[in-house]
Image (cartoon, helix red, strand yellow):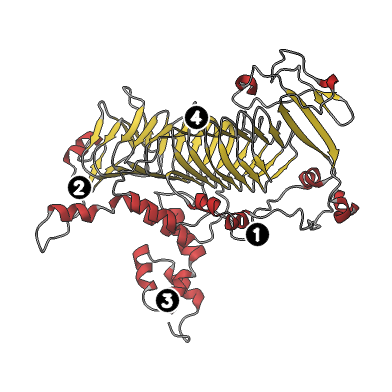
Amino acid sequence: METGGLPLELWRMILAYLHLPDLGRCSLVCRAWHELILSLDSTRWRQLCLGCTECRHPNWPNQPDVEPESWREAFKQHYLASKTWTKNALDLESSVCFSLFRRRKERRTLNVGPGHEFDSLGSALAMASLYDRIVLYPGVYEEQGEIILKVPVEIVGHGKLGEVALLASIDQHCSTTRLCSLVFMPAWFSPIMYKTTSGHVQFDNCNFENGHIQVHGPGTCQVKFCTFKNTHVFLHNVPLCVLENCEFVGSENNSVTVEGHPSADKNWAYKYLLGLIKSSPILLPTDDTDFLMSLDLESRDQAWSPRTCDIVIEGSQSPTSPSSSSPKPGSKAGGSQEAEVGSDGERVPPTPDSSDGGLSPSGEEDDEEQLTYRLSYQVQGPRPVLGGSFLGPPLPGASIQLPSCLVLNSLHQELQKDKEAMALANSVQGCLIRKCLFRDGKGGVFVCSYGRAKMEGNIFRNLTYAVRCIHNSKIVMLRNDIYRCRASGIFLRLEGGGLIAGNNIYHNAEAGVDIRKKSNPLILCNQIHHGLRSGIVVLGNGKGVIRNNQIFSNKEAGIYILYHGNPIVR
Protein backbone atom coordinates (compact mmCIF):
# COMPACT_ATOMS: atom_id res chain seq x y z
CA MET A 1 0.00 0.00 0.00
CA GLU A 2 1.56 3.25 -1.12
CA THR A 3 1.27 6.49 0.78
CA GLY A 4 -0.21 8.23 -2.23
CA GLY A 5 -3.00 5.66 -2.60
CA LEU A 6 -6.50 5.74 -1.25
CA PRO A 7 -7.20 7.12 2.22
CA LEU A 8 -7.33 4.57 5.02
CA GLU A 9 -11.03 5.20 5.56
CA LEU A 10 -11.79 4.11 1.99
CA TRP A 11 -9.56 1.05 2.34
CA ARG A 12 -11.42 0.04 5.50
CA MET A 13 -14.76 0.54 3.76
CA ILE A 14 -13.68 -1.67 0.83
CA LEU A 15 -12.22 -4.41 3.04
CA ALA A 16 -15.42 -4.49 5.12
CA TYR A 17 -17.08 -6.38 2.23
CA LEU A 18 -14.58 -9.26 2.26
CA HIS A 19 -15.29 -12.70 3.67
CA LEU A 20 -13.08 -14.43 6.20
CA PRO A 21 -10.82 -16.34 3.74
CA ASP A 22 -10.21 -13.17 1.72
CA LEU A 23 -9.32 -11.20 4.85
CA GLY A 24 -6.73 -13.85 5.70
CA ARG A 25 -5.19 -13.64 2.22
CA CYS A 26 -5.04 -9.83 2.35
CA SER A 27 -3.28 -9.90 5.72
CA LEU A 28 -0.45 -11.92 4.09
CA VAL A 29 0.30 -9.38 1.34
CA CYS A 30 2.59 -7.09 3.34
CA ARG A 31 3.00 -5.53 6.76
CA ALA A 32 0.92 -2.47 5.86
CA TRP A 33 -1.99 -4.62 4.72
CA HIS A 34 -1.63 -6.79 7.81
CA GLU A 35 -1.94 -3.75 10.07
CA LEU A 36 -4.87 -2.53 8.01
CA ILE A 37 -6.72 -5.83 8.50
CA LEU A 38 -6.05 -5.63 12.24
CA SER A 39 -7.53 -2.12 12.31
CA LEU A 40 -10.92 -3.56 11.31
CA ASP A 41 -11.41 -4.98 14.80
CA SER A 42 -14.41 -2.88 15.81
CA THR A 43 -16.06 -3.08 12.37
CA ARG A 44 -15.62 -6.13 10.15
CA TRP A 45 -14.24 -8.50 12.82
CA ARG A 46 -17.05 -7.53 15.19
CA GLN A 47 -19.58 -8.14 12.42
CA LEU A 48 -18.11 -11.58 11.65
CA CYS A 49 -18.06 -12.57 15.33
CA LEU A 50 -21.65 -11.53 16.07
CA GLY A 51 -22.89 -12.91 12.76
CA CYS A 52 -21.60 -16.41 13.44
CA THR A 53 -24.60 -18.67 14.11
CA GLU A 54 -22.46 -21.17 16.03
CA CYS A 55 -21.51 -18.80 18.86
CA ARG A 56 -22.87 -15.94 20.93
CA HIS A 57 -21.43 -12.74 22.34
CA PRO A 58 -17.88 -13.45 23.62
CA ASN A 59 -18.83 -12.30 27.14
CA TRP A 60 -22.17 -14.13 27.29
CA PRO A 61 -23.81 -14.90 29.72
CA ASN A 62 -22.16 -12.88 32.50
CA GLN A 63 -21.36 -9.61 30.71
CA PRO A 64 -23.19 -9.53 27.37
CA ASP A 65 -23.02 -5.72 27.28
CA VAL A 66 -19.23 -5.54 27.70
CA GLU A 67 -17.19 -5.68 24.52
CA PRO A 68 -14.12 -7.93 24.46
CA GLU A 69 -10.65 -6.46 24.23
CA SER A 70 -10.37 -7.73 20.67
CA TRP A 71 -13.20 -9.00 18.48
CA ARG A 72 -10.70 -10.59 16.13
CA GLU A 73 -9.08 -12.53 18.99
CA ALA A 74 -12.47 -13.66 20.30
CA PHE A 75 -13.48 -14.86 16.84
CA LYS A 76 -10.13 -16.62 16.44
CA GLN A 77 -10.47 -18.44 19.76
CA HIS A 78 -13.94 -19.69 18.88
CA TYR A 79 -12.83 -20.77 15.40
CA LEU A 80 -9.92 -22.77 16.82
CA ALA A 81 -12.14 -24.31 19.50
CA SER A 82 -14.77 -25.34 16.93
CA LYS A 83 -12.14 -27.35 15.01
CA THR A 84 -10.81 -29.32 17.98
CA TRP A 85 -13.02 -32.33 17.23
CA THR A 86 -11.29 -32.91 13.84
CA LYS A 87 -7.69 -32.78 15.08
CA ASN A 88 -7.20 -36.53 14.84
CA ALA A 89 -8.70 -36.83 11.34
CA LEU A 90 -5.31 -37.07 9.61
CA ASP A 91 -4.13 -39.74 12.02
CA LEU A 92 -7.19 -41.88 11.24
CA GLU A 93 -6.81 -41.42 7.49
CA SER A 94 -3.10 -42.29 7.49
CA SER A 95 -3.68 -45.42 9.55
CA VAL A 96 -6.06 -46.93 7.00
CA CYS A 97 -4.47 -45.70 3.78
CA PHE A 98 -1.25 -47.24 2.44
CA SER A 99 -1.18 -45.43 -0.86
CA LEU A 100 1.76 -43.11 -1.43
CA PHE A 101 -0.33 -40.68 -3.44
CA ARG A 102 -3.73 -40.55 -1.83
CA ARG A 103 -6.50 -38.11 -2.59
CA ARG A 104 -8.07 -36.15 0.20
CA LYS A 105 -11.49 -37.53 0.99
CA GLU A 106 -14.24 -34.93 0.70
CA ARG A 107 -16.78 -34.61 3.48
CA ARG A 108 -20.37 -35.16 2.48
CA THR A 109 -23.35 -33.18 3.71
CA LEU A 110 -26.45 -35.20 4.57
CA ASN A 111 -29.69 -33.23 4.86
CA VAL A 112 -32.45 -34.35 7.22
CA GLY A 113 -35.97 -32.97 7.26
CA PRO A 114 -39.23 -32.73 5.29
CA GLY A 115 -38.51 -32.67 1.55
CA HIS A 116 -34.88 -33.77 1.96
CA GLU A 117 -33.08 -37.06 1.41
CA PHE A 118 -33.52 -38.33 5.01
CA ASP A 119 -36.49 -38.03 7.29
CA SER A 120 -34.78 -38.92 10.61
CA LEU A 121 -31.39 -38.62 12.25
CA GLY A 122 -31.11 -42.40 12.63
CA SER A 123 -31.49 -43.01 8.89
CA ALA A 124 -28.87 -40.38 8.09
CA LEU A 125 -26.40 -41.89 10.57
CA ALA A 126 -26.85 -45.31 8.95
CA MET A 127 -25.49 -43.87 5.69
CA ALA A 128 -22.85 -41.53 7.16
CA SER A 129 -19.12 -41.92 6.63
CA LEU A 130 -16.16 -40.54 8.56
CA TYR A 131 -16.49 -36.83 9.42
CA ASP A 132 -19.64 -36.27 7.37
CA ARG A 133 -21.82 -33.29 8.18
CA ILE A 134 -25.47 -33.97 9.02
CA VAL A 135 -27.74 -30.93 8.78
CA LEU A 136 -31.11 -31.03 10.56
CA TYR A 137 -33.64 -28.61 9.10
CA PRO A 138 -36.22 -26.86 11.34
CA GLY A 139 -38.56 -29.24 13.09
CA VAL A 140 -38.91 -31.68 15.98
CA TYR A 141 -37.06 -34.99 15.63
CA GLU A 142 -38.08 -37.72 18.04
CA GLU A 143 -36.05 -40.92 17.91
CA GLN A 144 -37.85 -44.04 19.16
CA GLY A 145 -34.71 -45.94 20.13
CA GLU A 146 -31.23 -45.27 21.45
CA ILE A 147 -28.87 -43.81 18.85
CA ILE A 148 -25.36 -45.27 18.80
CA LEU A 149 -22.71 -43.16 17.10
CA LYS A 150 -20.21 -45.51 15.47
CA VAL A 151 -18.40 -43.07 13.15
CA PRO A 152 -17.21 -39.49 13.77
CA VAL A 153 -19.83 -37.06 12.46
CA GLU A 154 -20.91 -33.44 12.86
CA ILE A 155 -24.60 -32.84 13.59
CA VAL A 156 -25.73 -29.24 13.03
CA GLY A 157 -29.11 -27.56 13.30
CA HIS A 158 -30.05 -25.33 10.35
CA GLY A 159 -31.28 -21.85 11.14
CA LYS A 160 -31.55 -20.06 14.46
CA LEU A 161 -31.14 -21.80 17.80
CA GLY A 162 -34.48 -23.19 18.92
CA GLU A 163 -35.78 -24.11 15.48
CA VAL A 164 -34.39 -27.66 15.64
CA ALA A 165 -35.40 -29.86 18.60
CA LEU A 166 -33.96 -33.35 19.07
CA LEU A 167 -35.64 -35.81 21.45
CA ALA A 168 -33.12 -38.62 21.64
CA SER A 169 -30.77 -40.66 23.79
CA ILE A 170 -27.33 -40.78 22.13
CA ASP A 171 -24.51 -43.14 23.09
CA GLN A 172 -21.16 -42.26 21.50
CA HIS A 173 -18.89 -45.18 20.62
CA CYS A 174 -16.63 -43.33 18.17
CA SER A 175 -13.53 -41.23 18.78
CA THR A 176 -15.05 -37.79 18.23
CA THR A 177 -18.32 -35.95 17.52
CA ARG A 178 -19.52 -32.37 17.28
CA LEU A 179 -23.08 -31.11 17.84
CA CYS A 180 -24.10 -27.53 17.17
CA SER A 181 -27.22 -25.29 17.26
CA LEU A 182 -29.55 -27.97 18.61
CA VAL A 183 -32.14 -28.13 21.38
CA PHE A 184 -31.80 -31.42 23.27
CA MET A 185 -34.66 -32.97 25.21
CA PRO A 186 -34.78 -36.48 26.68
CA ALA A 187 -36.54 -39.29 24.86
CA TRP A 188 -39.56 -40.94 26.44
CA PHE A 189 -37.58 -44.02 27.51
CA SER A 190 -34.48 -42.46 29.13
CA PRO A 191 -33.49 -39.22 30.94
CA ILE A 192 -29.95 -39.50 29.49
CA MET A 193 -29.63 -37.26 26.46
CA TYR A 194 -25.97 -37.93 25.70
CA LYS A 195 -23.18 -40.12 27.06
CA THR A 196 -19.69 -41.21 26.10
CA THR A 197 -17.10 -43.39 27.83
CA SER A 198 -13.95 -42.93 25.76
CA GLY A 199 -14.40 -40.43 22.93
CA HIS A 200 -14.37 -36.65 22.66
CA VAL A 201 -17.63 -34.73 22.27
CA GLN A 202 -17.98 -31.05 21.46
CA PHE A 203 -21.15 -29.00 22.02
CA ASP A 204 -21.46 -25.50 20.55
CA ASN A 205 -24.46 -23.19 20.96
CA CYS A 206 -26.90 -25.85 22.17
CA ASN A 207 -29.75 -25.91 24.68
CA PHE A 208 -30.31 -28.85 27.02
CA GLU A 209 -33.59 -29.25 28.89
CA ASN A 210 -34.68 -31.61 31.69
CA GLY A 211 -32.16 -34.41 31.24
CA HIS A 212 -28.67 -35.73 31.94
CA ILE A 213 -25.29 -35.70 30.19
CA GLN A 214 -22.68 -38.26 31.18
CA VAL A 215 -18.98 -38.30 30.30
CA HIS A 216 -16.75 -41.05 31.68
CA GLY A 217 -12.97 -41.07 31.53
CA PRO A 218 -10.90 -41.31 29.45
CA GLY A 219 -13.62 -39.49 27.51
CA THR A 220 -13.43 -35.70 27.23
CA CYS A 221 -15.87 -32.94 26.38
CA GLN A 222 -15.75 -29.34 25.28
CA VAL A 223 -18.86 -27.20 25.80
CA LYS A 224 -19.26 -23.57 24.78
CA PHE A 225 -22.16 -21.10 24.54
CA CYS A 226 -24.70 -23.65 25.80
CA THR A 227 -27.71 -23.33 28.11
CA PHE A 228 -28.63 -26.06 30.60
CA LYS A 229 -32.17 -25.87 31.99
CA ASN A 230 -32.74 -28.31 34.83
CA THR A 231 -29.99 -30.48 33.33
CA HIS A 232 -27.33 -32.39 35.22
CA VAL A 233 -23.83 -32.77 33.77
CA PHE A 234 -22.07 -35.78 35.30
CA LEU A 235 -18.30 -36.12 34.79
CA HIS A 236 -16.72 -39.31 36.10
CA ASN A 237 -12.93 -39.78 36.14
CA VAL A 238 -12.54 -37.30 33.29
CA PRO A 239 -8.91 -36.34 32.54
CA LEU A 240 -9.96 -32.96 31.15
CA CYS A 241 -13.28 -31.31 30.28
CA VAL A 242 -13.89 -27.66 29.43
CA LEU A 243 -17.15 -25.77 30.09
CA GLU A 244 -16.98 -22.15 28.87
CA ASN A 245 -19.56 -19.38 28.52
CA CYS A 246 -22.44 -21.60 29.60
CA GLU A 247 -25.60 -20.90 31.59
CA PHE A 248 -27.03 -23.33 34.16
CA VAL A 249 -30.59 -22.54 35.23
CA GLY A 250 -33.10 -24.14 37.59
CA SER A 251 -31.27 -27.28 38.64
CA GLU A 252 -33.17 -29.57 41.01
CA ASN A 253 -29.92 -31.10 42.25
CA ASN A 254 -26.35 -30.23 41.22
CA SER A 255 -25.73 -28.56 37.89
CA VAL A 256 -22.29 -30.16 37.47
CA THR A 257 -20.94 -33.18 39.33
CA VAL A 258 -17.22 -34.03 39.09
CA GLU A 259 -16.55 -37.44 40.59
CA GLY A 260 -13.44 -39.58 40.82
CA HIS A 261 -9.76 -38.91 40.29
CA PRO A 262 -8.86 -37.85 36.72
CA SER A 263 -8.17 -40.91 34.61
CA ALA A 264 -4.53 -41.71 33.89
CA ASP A 265 -5.62 -43.11 30.52
CA LYS A 266 -6.06 -40.07 28.25
CA ASN A 267 -7.71 -40.02 24.83
CA TRP A 268 -6.41 -38.24 21.73
CA ALA A 269 -8.17 -34.91 22.52
CA TYR A 270 -6.40 -34.32 25.83
CA LYS A 271 -3.32 -32.57 24.44
CA TYR A 272 -5.39 -30.40 22.09
CA LEU A 273 -7.70 -29.26 24.89
CA LEU A 274 -4.69 -28.48 27.05
CA GLY A 275 -3.14 -26.40 24.27
CA LEU A 276 -6.42 -24.58 23.69
CA ILE A 277 -6.67 -23.69 27.39
CA LYS A 278 -3.10 -22.37 27.50
CA SER A 279 -3.59 -20.27 24.37
CA SER A 280 -6.75 -18.55 25.64
CA PRO A 281 -6.53 -15.41 27.81
CA ILE A 282 -6.19 -16.06 31.54
CA LEU A 283 -8.29 -14.33 34.19
CA LEU A 284 -5.60 -13.85 36.80
CA PRO A 285 -4.90 -10.22 37.78
CA THR A 286 -1.83 -8.66 36.22
CA ASP A 287 -1.28 -5.65 38.45
CA ASP A 288 -1.50 -4.82 42.10
CA THR A 289 -4.75 -2.88 41.88
CA ASP A 290 -6.91 -5.53 40.24
CA PHE A 291 -8.05 -6.95 43.55
CA LEU A 292 -9.41 -3.67 44.91
CA MET A 293 -13.00 -4.02 43.79
CA SER A 294 -15.25 -0.99 43.77
CA LEU A 295 -17.58 -0.56 46.74
CA ASP A 296 -20.22 2.07 47.34
CA LEU A 297 -19.69 4.71 50.01
CA GLU A 298 -21.92 2.91 52.49
CA SER A 299 -19.92 -0.31 52.14
CA ARG A 300 -16.63 1.53 52.52
CA ASP A 301 -17.94 3.30 55.59
CA GLN A 302 -18.98 0.00 57.12
CA ALA A 303 -15.68 -1.62 56.20
CA TRP A 304 -13.30 1.06 57.48
CA SER A 305 -15.11 3.03 60.18
CA PRO A 306 -14.39 2.32 63.89
CA ARG A 307 -16.20 -0.81 65.00
CA THR A 308 -15.91 -3.69 67.39
CA CYS A 309 -14.00 -6.78 66.34
CA ASP A 310 -15.56 -10.07 67.41
CA ILE A 311 -13.39 -13.06 68.19
CA VAL A 312 -15.63 -16.03 68.74
CA ILE A 313 -14.07 -19.10 70.35
CA GLU A 314 -15.95 -22.27 71.15
CA GLY A 315 -14.44 -25.21 72.97
CA SER A 316 -13.95 -26.71 76.42
CA GLN A 317 -14.22 -24.47 79.48
CA SER A 318 -11.35 -22.05 79.85
CA PRO A 319 -9.74 -21.52 83.28
CA THR A 320 -9.93 -17.78 82.70
CA SER A 321 -13.66 -17.71 82.19
CA PRO A 322 -15.87 -16.38 85.00
CA SER A 323 -17.74 -19.06 86.90
CA SER A 324 -21.03 -17.29 86.35
CA SER A 325 -20.78 -17.90 82.62
CA SER A 326 -20.25 -21.68 82.82
CA PRO A 327 -22.71 -23.66 80.72
CA LYS A 328 -25.29 -25.83 82.37
CA PRO A 329 -24.47 -29.52 82.44
CA GLY A 330 -25.83 -31.39 79.46
CA SER A 331 -26.24 -28.30 77.28
CA LYS A 332 -25.68 -28.89 73.56
CA ALA A 333 -23.15 -27.07 71.44
CA GLY A 334 -25.63 -25.60 68.99
CA GLY A 335 -28.40 -24.86 71.52
CA SER A 336 -29.54 -21.65 73.04
CA GLN A 337 -28.15 -22.54 76.49
CA GLU A 338 -24.60 -21.43 75.62
CA ALA A 339 -23.34 -18.24 77.15
CA GLU A 340 -21.53 -15.44 75.39
CA VAL A 341 -19.83 -12.92 77.60
CA GLY A 342 -18.68 -9.52 76.41
CA SER A 343 -16.01 -7.31 77.90
CA ASP A 344 -18.61 -5.54 80.01
CA GLY A 345 -20.03 -8.79 81.42
CA GLU A 346 -23.18 -8.62 79.29
CA ARG A 347 -24.77 -11.90 78.25
CA VAL A 348 -25.64 -12.09 74.57
CA PRO A 349 -27.24 -14.97 72.66
CA PRO A 350 -24.89 -17.32 70.81
CA THR A 351 -24.86 -17.48 67.02
CA PRO A 352 -23.13 -20.60 65.78
CA ASP A 353 -23.47 -21.22 62.06
CA SER A 354 -25.67 -24.03 60.82
CA SER A 355 -24.31 -23.79 57.33
CA ASP A 356 -24.87 -27.30 56.03
CA GLY A 357 -28.33 -27.10 54.56
CA GLY A 358 -29.94 -26.41 57.91
CA LEU A 359 -27.95 -28.96 59.92
CA SER A 360 -26.58 -27.82 63.24
CA PRO A 361 -22.78 -27.89 63.61
CA SER A 362 -23.22 -29.53 66.99
CA GLY A 363 -23.65 -32.93 65.41
CA GLU A 364 -19.94 -33.74 65.62
CA GLU A 365 -19.18 -33.00 69.27
CA ASP A 366 -22.49 -33.43 71.03
CA ASP A 367 -21.02 -35.17 74.07
CA GLU A 368 -18.66 -32.34 75.03
CA GLU A 369 -19.66 -29.31 77.03
CA GLN A 370 -19.11 -26.17 75.01
CA LEU A 371 -18.60 -22.56 76.01
CA THR A 372 -18.68 -19.49 73.83
CA TYR A 373 -17.00 -16.18 74.59
CA ARG A 374 -17.34 -13.00 72.64
CA LEU A 375 -14.47 -10.60 73.29
CA SER A 376 -15.35 -7.13 72.03
CA TYR A 377 -12.93 -4.26 71.85
CA GLN A 378 -12.32 -1.08 69.93
CA VAL A 379 -9.62 -1.12 67.27
CA GLN A 380 -6.86 1.03 68.79
CA GLY A 381 -3.75 0.22 66.79
CA PRO A 382 -4.31 2.24 63.62
CA ARG A 383 -5.44 5.46 65.36
CA PRO A 384 -1.97 7.05 65.84
CA VAL A 385 -1.10 6.27 62.24
CA LEU A 386 -4.37 7.10 60.51
CA GLY A 387 -5.60 10.05 62.46
CA GLY A 388 -9.22 10.99 62.87
CA SER A 389 -9.80 11.97 59.24
CA PHE A 390 -9.56 8.42 57.91
CA LEU A 391 -11.92 6.96 60.45
CA GLY A 392 -14.79 9.16 59.35
CA PRO A 393 -16.91 8.49 56.25
CA PRO A 394 -14.87 9.05 53.07
CA LEU A 395 -15.65 12.10 51.02
CA PRO A 396 -17.20 11.50 47.58
CA GLY A 397 -14.46 11.13 44.98
CA ALA A 398 -11.68 11.20 47.54
CA SER A 399 -8.97 8.54 47.37
CA ILE A 400 -8.24 6.69 50.59
CA GLN A 401 -4.63 5.82 51.38
CA LEU A 402 -4.14 2.89 53.70
CA PRO A 403 -0.94 2.81 55.78
CA SER A 404 1.64 0.21 54.84
CA CYS A 405 0.78 -1.86 57.92
CA LEU A 406 -2.82 -2.30 56.71
CA VAL A 407 -2.47 -2.53 52.93
CA LEU A 408 -3.24 -6.05 51.76
CA ASN A 409 -1.27 -7.73 49.03
CA SER A 410 -2.97 -8.30 45.71
CA LEU A 411 -3.63 -11.79 44.44
CA HIS A 412 -0.80 -11.41 41.96
CA GLN A 413 1.63 -10.56 44.76
CA GLU A 414 0.46 -13.45 46.93
CA LEU A 415 0.84 -15.94 44.10
CA GLN A 416 4.32 -14.65 43.36
CA LYS A 417 5.33 -15.20 46.99
CA ASP A 418 3.67 -18.59 47.44
CA LYS A 419 4.93 -21.13 44.92
CA GLU A 420 2.45 -23.76 46.08
CA ALA A 421 -0.45 -21.38 45.50
CA MET A 422 0.96 -20.45 42.10
CA ALA A 423 1.18 -24.12 41.12
CA LEU A 424 -2.45 -24.64 42.17
CA ALA A 425 -3.61 -21.56 40.26
CA ASN A 426 -1.89 -22.72 37.07
CA SER A 427 -2.96 -26.35 37.33
CA VAL A 428 -5.60 -27.71 34.96
CA GLN A 429 -6.90 -31.16 35.77
CA GLY A 430 -10.30 -32.78 35.71
CA CYS A 431 -12.91 -30.15 34.85
CA LEU A 432 -12.35 -26.50 33.91
CA ILE A 433 -15.42 -24.26 34.30
CA ARG A 434 -14.82 -20.76 33.02
CA LYS A 435 -17.02 -17.67 32.56
CA CYS A 436 -20.25 -19.55 33.28
CA LEU A 437 -23.44 -18.48 35.07
CA PHE A 438 -25.15 -20.68 37.68
CA ARG A 439 -28.48 -19.29 38.86
CA ASP A 440 -31.88 -20.05 40.35
CA GLY A 441 -31.37 -23.67 41.33
CA LYS A 442 -30.28 -25.94 44.13
CA GLY A 443 -26.58 -26.57 43.62
CA GLY A 444 -23.80 -25.27 41.42
CA VAL A 445 -20.74 -27.54 41.27
CA PHE A 446 -20.32 -30.72 43.35
CA VAL A 447 -16.81 -32.24 43.49
CA CYS A 448 -16.45 -35.57 45.28
CA SER A 449 -14.41 -38.79 45.63
CA TYR A 450 -10.97 -37.42 44.70
CA GLY A 451 -12.39 -35.23 41.94
CA ARG A 452 -10.55 -32.20 40.56
CA ALA A 453 -12.19 -29.01 39.30
CA LYS A 454 -11.09 -25.49 38.47
CA MET A 455 -13.58 -22.60 38.39
CA GLU A 456 -12.53 -19.27 36.97
CA GLY A 457 -14.52 -16.08 36.40
CA ASN A 458 -17.96 -17.60 37.06
CA ILE A 459 -21.08 -16.18 38.72
CA PHE A 460 -23.07 -18.22 41.26
CA ARG A 461 -26.30 -16.58 42.40
CA ASN A 462 -29.66 -17.52 43.94
CA LEU A 463 -28.63 -21.10 44.68
CA THR A 464 -28.85 -23.23 47.79
CA TYR A 465 -25.05 -23.48 47.64
CA ALA A 466 -22.48 -22.59 45.00
CA VAL A 467 -19.69 -25.16 45.36
CA ARG A 468 -19.41 -28.30 47.48
CA CYS A 469 -16.09 -30.17 47.77
CA ILE A 470 -15.88 -33.42 49.76
CA HIS A 471 -13.93 -36.64 50.21
CA ASN A 472 -10.32 -35.80 49.33
CA SER A 473 -11.32 -33.66 46.36
CA LYS A 474 -9.51 -30.51 45.29
CA ILE A 475 -10.93 -27.29 43.86
CA VAL A 476 -9.30 -24.16 42.48
CA MET A 477 -11.58 -21.10 42.53
CA LEU A 478 -10.27 -17.88 41.00
CA ARG A 479 -12.18 -14.60 40.75
CA ASN A 480 -15.72 -15.90 40.98
CA ASP A 481 -18.77 -14.02 42.26
CA ILE A 482 -20.85 -15.94 44.81
CA TYR A 483 -23.89 -14.24 46.26
CA ARG A 484 -27.44 -14.71 47.53
CA CYS A 485 -27.02 -18.39 48.37
CA ARG A 486 -29.65 -19.82 50.71
CA ALA A 487 -26.97 -21.70 52.68
CA SER A 488 -23.20 -21.20 52.65
CA GLY A 489 -21.43 -20.25 49.46
CA ILE A 490 -18.59 -22.81 49.54
CA PHE A 491 -18.60 -26.07 51.53
CA LEU A 492 -15.52 -28.21 52.17
CA ARG A 493 -15.89 -31.58 53.92
CA LEU A 494 -13.96 -34.81 54.48
CA GLU A 495 -10.43 -33.60 53.70
CA GLY A 496 -11.43 -31.40 50.80
CA GLY A 497 -8.90 -28.75 49.83
CA GLY A 498 -7.45 -26.58 47.11
CA LEU A 499 -7.17 -22.85 46.45
CA ILE A 500 -9.93 -20.26 46.94
CA ALA A 501 -8.51 -16.92 45.78
CA GLY A 502 -9.68 -13.54 44.53
CA ASN A 503 -13.40 -14.29 44.87
CA ASN A 504 -16.17 -11.90 45.81
CA ILE A 505 -18.47 -13.70 48.28
CA TYR A 506 -21.36 -11.70 49.72
CA HIS A 507 -25.03 -11.58 50.78
CA ASN A 508 -25.22 -15.29 51.57
CA ALA A 509 -27.68 -16.62 54.16
CA GLU A 510 -25.03 -18.68 55.98
CA ALA A 511 -21.23 -18.55 56.02
CA GLY A 512 -19.34 -17.46 52.95
CA VAL A 513 -16.91 -20.39 53.32
CA ASP A 514 -17.68 -23.42 55.53
CA ILE A 515 -14.73 -25.71 56.40
CA ARG A 516 -15.25 -28.99 58.28
CA LYS A 517 -13.96 -32.52 58.88
CA LYS A 518 -10.21 -32.18 58.22
CA SER A 519 -10.61 -30.05 55.11
CA ASN A 520 -7.54 -27.91 54.50
CA PRO A 521 -7.97 -25.19 51.82
CA LEU A 522 -5.81 -22.17 51.06
CA ILE A 523 -8.00 -19.03 51.17
CA LEU A 524 -6.31 -15.95 49.71
CA CYS A 525 -7.29 -12.40 48.78
CA ASN A 526 -11.07 -12.84 48.85
CA GLN A 527 -13.72 -10.30 49.72
CA ILE A 528 -16.23 -11.92 52.08
CA HIS A 529 -18.80 -9.38 53.19
CA HIS A 530 -22.42 -8.54 53.98
CA GLY A 531 -23.26 -12.12 54.92
CA LEU A 532 -26.34 -12.78 57.01
CA ARG A 533 -24.18 -14.86 59.38
CA SER A 534 -20.41 -15.38 59.63
CA GLY A 535 -17.82 -14.75 56.96
CA ILE A 536 -15.82 -17.98 57.42
CA VAL A 537 -16.68 -20.83 59.80
CA VAL A 538 -14.16 -23.54 60.71
CA LEU A 539 -15.24 -26.48 62.86
CA GLY A 540 -15.07 -30.25 63.27
CA ASN A 541 -11.26 -30.53 62.96
CA GLY A 542 -11.30 -28.26 59.95
CA LYS A 543 -8.01 -26.62 59.02
CA GLY A 544 -6.85 -24.25 56.32
CA VAL A 545 -4.79 -21.14 55.77
CA ILE A 546 -6.80 -17.91 55.74
CA ARG A 547 -4.54 -15.12 54.55
CA ASN A 548 -4.83 -11.63 53.15
CA ASN A 549 -8.64 -11.50 52.87
CA GLN A 550 -11.05 -8.62 53.32
CA ILE A 551 -13.78 -9.88 55.67
CA PHE A 552 -16.23 -7.18 56.73
CA SER A 553 -19.85 -6.18 57.32
CA ASN A 554 -21.06 -9.69 58.16
CA LYS A 555 -23.85 -9.86 60.74
CA GLU A 556 -21.92 -12.31 62.91
CA ALA A 557 -18.24 -13.06 63.38
CA GLY A 558 -15.84 -12.50 60.53
CA ILE A 559 -14.18 -15.85 61.29
CA TYR A 560 -15.97 -18.35 63.53
CA ILE A 561 -13.74 -21.13 64.96
CA LEU A 562 -15.36 -23.87 67.05
CA TYR A 563 -15.43 -27.62 67.73
CA HIS A 564 -11.68 -28.26 67.29
CA GLY A 565 -11.31 -26.06 64.26
CA ASN A 566 -7.63 -25.23 63.74
CA PRO A 567 -6.97 -22.82 60.87
CA ILE A 568 -3.99 -20.50 60.37
CA VAL A 569 -5.24 -16.92 60.12
CA ARG A 570 -2.98 -14.11 58.93
Front disc: 1 or 4: 1
Number of residues whose C-alpha sits closer than 10 Å to that of mark 3, classed few (under 14), some (14–19) or many (20 or more): some
Q: Which mark, by number, is residue 251?
A: 4
Query: Whole-Å distance between the Cαs marked 2 and 1?
Result: 51 Å
Query: In the figure, residue 480 lies in which quadrant?
Result: top right
Which sits earlier in the primary sequence, circle 2 or circle 1?
2
Q: Position of residue 168 (x, y in %)?
A: 31, 30
Apparent side of residue 57 relative to residue 154 in the rendered image (left or right): right
- Give the image location of residue 138, x and y in percent: 33, 38
Are the residues tagged 3 and 4 within 8 Å (C-beta)?
A: no
Give the spatial CA distance, label 1 vs label 4: 37 Å
Label 1's element?
loop
Q: Earlier in the sequence, mark 3 or mark 4?
A: 3
| Disc 3 + disc 2, Cβ < 8 Å | no
Of pointers 3 and 2, the one earlier in the residue sequence: 3
Tell me the residue that label 3 is attached to. Answer: 33
Query: Mark 2 is on which residue type?
Result: Leu
Q: Nearer the viewer, residue 89 or 50?
A: 89
Label 3 to label 4, Cα distance in Å? 50 Å
- Secondary structure of the residue carrying tag 3 is helix
User: Mark 2 falls on what kind of element?
Assistant: loop
Q: Quadrant of the N terminus?
A: bottom left
Q: Which mark is residue 288?
A: 1
Q: Badge 2 is on which residue?
A: 130
Residue 29, percent from left and from top: 36, 77
Q: What is the three-letter code of the residue carrying label 3?
A: Trp
Q: Quadrant of residue 260?
A: top left
Compute the Cα span from label 1 to label 3.
37 Å
**Nearer mark to the viewer, of 1 and 3:** 1
Mark 1 vs 3, N-terminal side: 3
Q: Which residue is at 26% across, 52% downward? A: 88
Q: Residues within 10 Å of mark 4 (few under 14, many from 20)?
A: many
